[in-house]
Image (cartoon, rainbow, N blue to C red):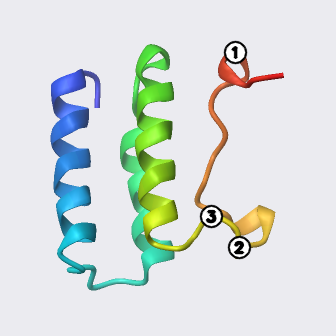
Amino acid sequence: MDTLATIRAALAVAGERIERDALREDPRVFMDQLWRQVYDAAPDDLQPYVWARLADFSARLGLMGDLPTHRSPVRAPPEVFVRR
């Protein structure tokens, strides 16, 4: 996931699956795999964009507040982007 075009394509496919309610797996598993595939592999300069999109997907799937911290698919952005 080294280019913005590749990242946008992966996010578009994921977003479409969410919109069509076409997830075959548990939403938590889906989001965890997506975080690993897209966010973890994104260059540092693209991680804030990816984080925002994936946080939106998590919210649409109802996963933002109901998970224990250690199990949450939502990873914080790199320290440099954290608001204080």
Marks 1 and 2 sit apart, C-alpha to C-alpha, by: 25 Å
| Mark linked to residue 67 | 2
Given this view, does label 2 or label 3 mark the residue nearer the observer? 3
Does 55 sit left or right of 23 as displayed?
right
Amino acid beneath label 1: Val
| Mark linked to residue 64 | 3
Residue 77, placed above or below residue 72: above
Tell me which label, 1 or 2, sits earlier in the chain.
Answer: 2
- Residue occupying image coordinates x 42% and y 83%: 26
Given this view, does label 3 or label 1 mark the residue nearer the observer? 3
- Residue occupying image coordinates x 62% and y 64%: 64
Residue 34, placed above or below residue 46: below
Task: Give yes or no for contact between labels 2 and 3 (Cβ–Cβ under 8 Å).
Answer: no
Question: In terms of secondary structure, where does tag 3 sit?
Answer: loop
- Residue occupying image coordinates x 78% and y 71%: 68
Q: Position of residue 5 (x, y in %)?
A: 16, 27
- Residue occupying image coordinates x 40% and y 43%: 53
Point out the image quarter for the C terminus: top right
| Mark linked to residue 80 | 1
Mark 2 nearby-residue class (10 Å; few <14, some 14–19, many ≥20): few
